[in-house]
Image (tube, grey):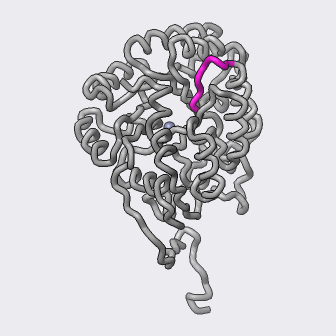
Amino acid sequence: MTSEEQGIALSDFVPQPTLVTEEHAIGKAKFPAVDAHNHLGWWEAEKADELVALMDEAGLRTIVSLDGGRRENLEDHLDAYPRKHPGRFVVFTRVAWNEAEDPQFPARAAEQLRRDVEAGARGLKVSKTLGLRARNPEGDLYRADDDRLAPVWQACAEVGIPVLIHIADPVAFFQPLDGRNERWEELHRHQGWHFFKPEFPSFDDLMQQQENLVAAHPKTTFISAHVGSYAENLAWISGMFDRYPNYYVDISARIAELGRQPYTTREWFLKYADRILFGTDSRPNAGTYRIHWRFLETADEYFNYSLADPPGQGRWRIYGVHLPDGVLRKVYHDNAARLIDLG
Ligand SMILES: [Zn+2]
């Protein structure tokens, strides 16, 4: 056999497109942008000045850090970012889901929330722990729509902060890990992200929990992370927008999904321009922001959605959705400014 007949491992297959199409390098967002989903736990607190310089270059007005969570860390996080650079950073807090088995947890969490907001937190971040890991007083998984958690959501409405909630994960993470799974390579690298196991709820169940939660608390504003965890099905997200005026999404970590269905995505942005927030969920990096600006602002075709090659979420490329200025302004800034006190 010649080496040409032997083949190569999939991991060695990194095809480089030979297409010759227009390419636009956009270093700076067209309008001042808010990254509504970031984690400055990934950054070095003593280098906040460097981060501000990076933001100025990329055209970012504000970064929302969802890492004000661990209680002892909230004050440090506030000191390092918003208190040092007012208007440029916002910090969200968290509640201690590892204490959720205690029947007093919801009341205690609600109280802690009020104190955190007084200290300077501007939102509550809820991770996918709720739905996949947190335990209720019976020792079972806490459902996101469990009535006992109502005090937490009510407290957010009362003090006027949004809940940025991540529920579930990509659909493929809830499917069998075999040769038909489109995220096989990613799941092979991160086996802890595979939820097709008896101890976990199904994807559909988690989407139902999400809907029940949003429906039961119309006075609470929910920003559902990663396009509501269902970027694969924008019709479903559109239904949520139609039914619940308190429901919003961020697009963080999902331009791979959005950019492979550019016609549907563009129509969706135009129709729901008031409900979609820009975000990255990625350590701040000029290159990563550039890819996002290119996706949102240009009609460039078939480009990598990531700095990695092959990109991590799947072996496909994306298309820009060339949003008009009015939509860009809302998605980049105005929607975030309406929902979050940006200082
Ligand atoms: Zn995140």
Residue 133 in the image: above or below residue 104:
below
The image quadrant of residue 329 is top left
Residue 221 in the image: above or below residue 297:
above
Residue located at (47% from left, 37% from top): 37
Residue located at (69% from left, 30% from top): 210
Left or right for 234, reference 205: left
Residue 60 place in picture, x, y as percent: 35, 41
Residue 241 place in picture, x, y as percent: 67, 34
Residue 29 place in picture, x, y as percent: 38, 48
Where are the magenta residues, as a range? 217-225
Left or right for 19, reference 266: left
In this orientation, which residue lies closer to the viewer: 312 or 22?
Answer: 22
Residue located at (51% from left, 71% from top): 14
The quadrant of the rendering that contains the N terminus is bottom right
Q: Residue 23: within the magenta?
A: no
Residue located at (48% from left, 27% from top): 338
Total numbered labels: 0
Residue 36 place in picture, x, y as percent: 46, 35
Let me know if residue 111 appears in the view: yes
In this orientation, which residue lies closer to the viewer: 85 or 188?
Answer: 85
The quadrant of the rendering that contains the C terminus is top left
The image quadrant of residue 47 is top left
Residue 116 in the image: above or below residue 295:
above
Let me know if residue 69 appears in the view: no
